[in-house]
Image (cartoon, coloured by chain):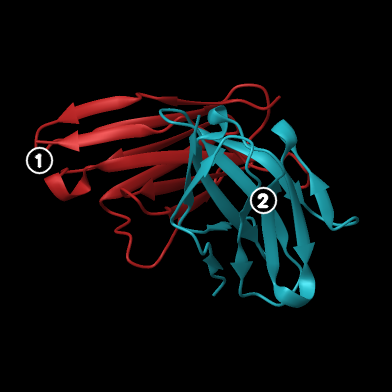
Chain colours: A cyan, B red
Amino acid sequence: AQSVSQHNHHVILSEAASLELGCNYSYGGTVNLFWYVQYPGQHLQLLLKYFSGDPLVKGIKGFEAEFIKSKFSFNLRKPSVQWSDTAEYFCAVRSGSYQLTFGKGTKLSVIP
Amino acid sequence: GAVVSQHPSRVICKSGTSVKIECRSLDFQATTMFWYRQFPKQSLMLMATSNEGSKATYEQGVEKDKFLINHASLTLSTLTVTSAHPEDSSFYICSATQQGTHYGYTFGSGTRLTVV
């Protein structure tokens, strides 16, 4: 079965710091990859997704992610975080079916 | 963009009663809907997948007689928690997708169920 690992449970950064959140998955075949964000008290929102093509994917709010097939990774990055980026971030993978497998999430706290 | 409405957002019920949660796709036809349960500080755990007009497929360990899922139309799926117990208290989230498109997945805002 597919599994998704997010290495950091809680990340604390100061504003303007750079962000990288790790995501690794286990399935070796064709995958679709997603990053979702959940702001406090809100529902999950799609940040970006990778289906095919350029492995460097740009999403909303200045986020990007790079798919590295050889490393089974899809890390999320942002060069300069803002206080408003404080949220929980979930990596998700779809392989073979329409089901998504989620990582456990990474809580990001940005200190002004 | 695609919108999924989930209702109610919060519900408190007495132990032994049943609670119904609705999930509606407002501007697209949701051929497949998913129901998740989210525990505090944990990831979303898939409970079941439902395709319109078919019986839901439950994940291992999820009691299908306790968590009744109906997906009778392309815009509505319901989750009924029957004979609720305090351990059923959780955050339930639905998600919808349209097969064959790159709509991706759209999530509802979730339902906080508290069983007292």
How many numbered markers are drawn? 2
Q: Secondary structure at mark 2?
A: strand
Residue that carries the numbered disc 1 in the rendered image: B16
Residue that carries the numbered disc 2 in the rendered image: A34
Is B4 placed above or below B66 here? above
Disc number placed over residue A32 in the picture, else none? none
Residue drawn at 10 percent across, 40 percent down = B16
Is A6 placed above or below B35 here? below
Indicate the quadrant where residue B92 lies: top left
Quadrant into which the C terminus of chain B falls: top left
Along the viewing direction, whichever of B55 and A100 lies nearer the viewer? A100
Residue drawn at 54 percent across, 46 percent down = A89
Quadrant into which the N terminus of chain B falls: top right
Q: Are marks 1 and 2 on the same chain?
A: no
Q: Residues within 10 Å of mark 1 (few under 14, many from 20)?
A: some
Q: Is residue B65 left or right of residue B115?
A: right
How far apart are the two marked residues, 1 and 2, measured between alpha carbons?
38 Å
Q: Position of residue A103 (x, y in %)?
A: 51, 59
Q: Position of residue B42 (x, y in %)?
A: 37, 54
Indicate the quadrant where residue B4 lies: top right
Along the viewing direction, whichever of A8 and B44 lies nearer the viewer? A8
Along the viewing direction, whichever of B115 and B42 lies nearer the viewer? B42
Q: Position of residue A81 (x, y in %)?
A: 63, 37
Chain of the residue under label 1: B
Q: Is residue A65 left or right of residue A81?
A: right
Q: Nearer the viewer, mark 1 or mark 2?
A: 2
Q: Residues within 10 Å of mark 2 (few under 14, many from 20)?
A: many
